[in-house]
Image: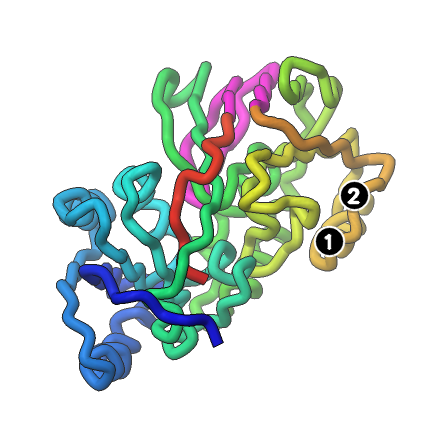
């Protein structure tokens, strides 16, 4: 068993609306367990990410931040975590939970997370995405998991319309099938560290720090959040049947090496499209853009396992 260090000042960031209210419903049990363990904590109970971020930024640099929510909750806090010395722990009770899932955390597993408070953290990379042209041109955002353009960004937008009875993975699959009917190809040029990875018609490009999105689709199985590199993936000119077959491969992480998939790792990626294309940033829909640059920020976040 890993030896524990003294638990640093602890702030619990609770987004009660995460996971369609699951985070809020889970709080009484989590609070009881925190108190049973004798842990002193500050509760940051905020539905609005900007307000939660401001409160975390006011914490000491050596504080431990326990994020109770999904990928969106964690993403909103990144500016207060990257290269600040604050530690991050995540209790995954959101819709997709892809970052926590990649680290081996099961939805709602707060006992395992609390067991690791006070243990040595793992340094994980972050990404910085800058929109070069299109909606929001000139703005930058820090990411922990990754971004997508084209088909998967359209899926992210449609996920909000999925039936409420579906889980995170089920909602993504429902939206993906709906987006498949709207498939269109646009010419893209993808450059990794200044070299052209792919140039031609495409329906999808992703730049990943993590391995998965959509509640379990293994879009980038070669990714390692601690290797100081990002991973770029671009589809070729797929038809609807070909894309459907590729989706089945992506689910199992068996699409790398397919002739209609180009991929590479590096430090910087630039995606340039010939017409405005939907963009998502860590699952958040960010409008339509024609160019974006993504850079890795190595060892940016201290993450508790």
Q: Residue furthest right?
A: 259
CB within 8 Å, label 1 to label 2: yes
Question: Where's residue 207, x and y in %?
Answer: 58, 35
Q: Is residue 94 above or below residue 192?
A: below
Q: Which residue is mark 1?
A: 253
Within 10 angstroms of label 2, few (less than 14), some, or many (20 or more) residues?
some
**Magenta residues: mostly which secondary structure?**
strand
The residue sitting at 63% across, 40% down in the picture is 182
Residue at position x 26%, y 57% from top?
Answer: 64
Residue 217 placement (x, y as % from top left): 63, 55
Looking at the rendered structure, the number of numbered marks drawn on it comes to: 2
Q: Is residue 151 magenta?
A: no
Callout 2 secondary element: loop
In magenta, the rendered stretch is 268-294
Alpha carbons under labels 1 and 2: distance apart: 7 Å
Viewer-side residue, 300 vs 236: 300
In depth, the one of 9 and 140 nearer the eye is 9
Residue plotted at (43% across, 68% down) = 164
Name above or below for residue 101 compared with residue 36: above
Task: Residue 256: give its label.
Answer: 2
Q: Nearer the viewer, residue 83 or 120?
A: 120
Residue drawn at x 38%, y 75% as measured from the top left: 115
**Residue 8 picture location, percent across and down:** 23, 60
- The answer to which image quadrant residue 80 occupies is top left
Decide: few, some or many residues near mark 1? Use Cα within 10 Å; few <14, some 14-19, many ≥20. Answer: some
Q: Which mark is residue 158?
A: none
Q: Is residue 19 visible?
A: no
Percent across and percent down for residue 48 are 21, 50
> The C terminus appears in which quarter of the rendering?
bottom left
């Amino acid at each position: 068993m890993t030896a524990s260090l003294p638990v640093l000042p602890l702030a619990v960031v609770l987004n009660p609306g995460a996971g369609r209210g699951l985070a809020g419903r889970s709080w009484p049990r989590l609070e009881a367990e925190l108190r049973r363990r004798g842990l002193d904590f500050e509760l940051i109970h905020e539905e609005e990410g900007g307000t939660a971020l401001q409160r975390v930024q006011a914490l000491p640099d050596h504080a431990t931040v326990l994020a109770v929510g999904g990928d969106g909750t964690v993403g909103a806090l990144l500016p207060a975590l990257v290269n600040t010395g604050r530690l991050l722990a995540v209790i995954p009770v959101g819709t997709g939970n892809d970052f926590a899932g990649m680290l081996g955390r099961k939805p709602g597993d707060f006992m395992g997370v609390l067991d690791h408070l006070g243990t040595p953290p793992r340094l994980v990379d972050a990404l910085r995405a800058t929109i070069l042209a299109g909606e929001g041109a000139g703005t930058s955002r820090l990411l922990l998991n990754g971004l997508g353009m084209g088909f998967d960004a359209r899926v992210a937008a449609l996920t909000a319309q999925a039936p409420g009875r579906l889980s995170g993975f089920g909602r993504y699959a429902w939206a993906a099938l709906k987006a498949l009917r709207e498939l269109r190809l646009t010419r893209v040029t993808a450059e990794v560290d200044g070299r052209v990875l792919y140039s031609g018609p495409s329906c999808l490009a992703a730049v990943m720090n993590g391995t998965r999105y959509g509640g379990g689709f293994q879009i980038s199985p070669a990714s390692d959040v601690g290797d100081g590199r990002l991973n770029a993936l671009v589809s070729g000119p797929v038809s609807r049947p070909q894309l459907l077959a590729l989706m089945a491969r992506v689910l199992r992480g068996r699409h790398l090496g397919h002739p209609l998939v180009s991929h590479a790792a590096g430090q910087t990626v630039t995606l340039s499209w010939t017409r405005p294309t939907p963009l998502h940033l860590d699952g958040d829909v960010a409008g339509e853009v024609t160019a974006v640059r993504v850079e890795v920020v190595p060892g940016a976040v201290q993450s508790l396992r």
